[in-house]
Image (cartoon, helix red, strand yellow):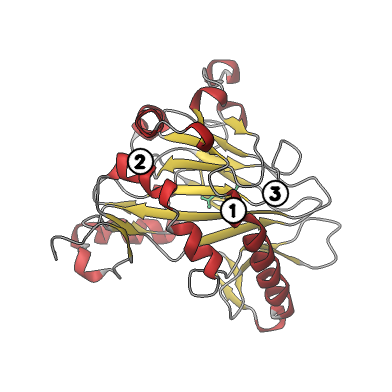
Amino acid sequence: MNAKSLKPQITAEEISVSVDALDIDRAAAIYREHGCLVARGLMKQYVAEMARDIAATVERSVAMLDKAERKPEGWVVPNGSLFIPAPEGCNRDKQIMTVGISYYTSAAFLRAATDPTALDILEAILGPDIELFGNGQSLVKEPVGGHPKHLHQDSAYFEHRYEGPVAILTYVVDTDLVNGALRIVPGSHNKGQLRHIDTFSHLGLDEDDWPWEASLPIIGQAGDSIFFNVKTIHGSKQNHSDTPRPVFINRYRRPNDYAIIRATTTANRAEAEKQARQARKTNELRGLMARGFRRDEE
Ligand SMILES: O=C(O)CCC(=O)C(=O)O
């Protein structure tokens, strides 16, 4: 594969808007065309509290490691944090990956999820009625070699009946090529559902087909947010800095949408694919309404 031919033909600047001079229609148009959008400064006001709450949750999670339960994805401690094998040189044999923080444990997280400017942009993308998908997610890359997240589509993990969720991933610290900038493949939301393989960071794309060079790194400051479609290819490399690299993610969808396949490995995805036709909105937990009204009970 010629990596040069895969190199994104667009710059981060071209898919970015600033909340200080926000043109909502332009923001939505960028998202629609490229399957991604960078909103500079969108979540600045929540960053200090989110940094505090994420750090406290990580500390508690590490203290619970002796109660960790083995799962196909790694080890899960009682507060829901997921650990995977640690990089060489770490003083533990397990490193944190996803942090057991949610709207149930952090008021700042819930406030960020219902941020009015974020919802204005989402409304221009999804329409007037918007349901939260999930209870919020946070990932932390530990210092000095914290995990990579291989390029993937979120739809490998939760494929939806209709358009699927919009994710908003927010940097909690200034993030660059050293500590693991999010990398994104603009336009890849139009490629349909791609075949994923099992990787160190769970479902991921085959690097021979989708090398890192195909992706555009988004260098940003704490409080910058990246919107992306459930089928937009994204991922991030290891954290080579000496401090943690946290992010938090809020996800939203139209109220009538629902997951038809949920998976974390190729084996459980193959099983879930067989059941996809039986999936119904009524079989899934409804999310809280972030804007508008749930018009049709399906
Ligand atoms: O932490 C990151 O940079 C990536 C997170 C991610 O790709 C995901 O949760 O789908």
* Numbered disc in front, either 3 or 1: 1
Residue in view at x 36 percent, y 32 percent: 191
Q: Quarter of the image containing the N terminus?
A: top right
CA gap, disc 2 to disc 1?
35 Å
Residue in view at x 49 percent, y 27 percent: 15
Locate residue 191 relative to residue 218 in the image: left or right.
left
Q: Position of residue 230 (x, y in %)?
A: 39, 45
Q: Badge 3 is on which residue?
A: 173
CA gap, disc 3 to disc 1?
13 Å
Q: Disc 2 or 3, which lies upstream in sequence?
A: 3
Q: Disc 2 or 1, which lies upstream in sequence?
A: 1
Residue in view at x 57 percent, y 60 percent: 138
The residue under label 2 is which amino acid type?
Answer: Gln
Report if the CB atoms under discs 2 and 1 are less than 8 Å apart.
no
Q: Badge 1 is on which residue?
A: 45
Residue in view at x 42 percent, y 54 percent: 251
* Numbered disc in front, either 2 or 1: 1
Count of residue discs: 3
The correct choice, above or below, for 225 with respect to 252 in the image is: above
Label 1 CA crowd tier, 10 Å (few <14, some 14–19, many 20+): some
Q: Residue furthest front?
A: 20
Report if the CB atoms under discs 2 and 3 are less than 8 Å apart.
no
Q: Badge 2 is on which residue?
A: 193
The residue under label 1 is which amino acid type?
Answer: Gln
Report if the CB atoms under discs 3 and 1 are less than 8 Å apart.
no
CA gap, disc 2 to disc 3?
32 Å
Q: Is residue 158 among what the camera can see?
A: no
Provide the secondary structure element on which disc 1 rests. Answer: helix
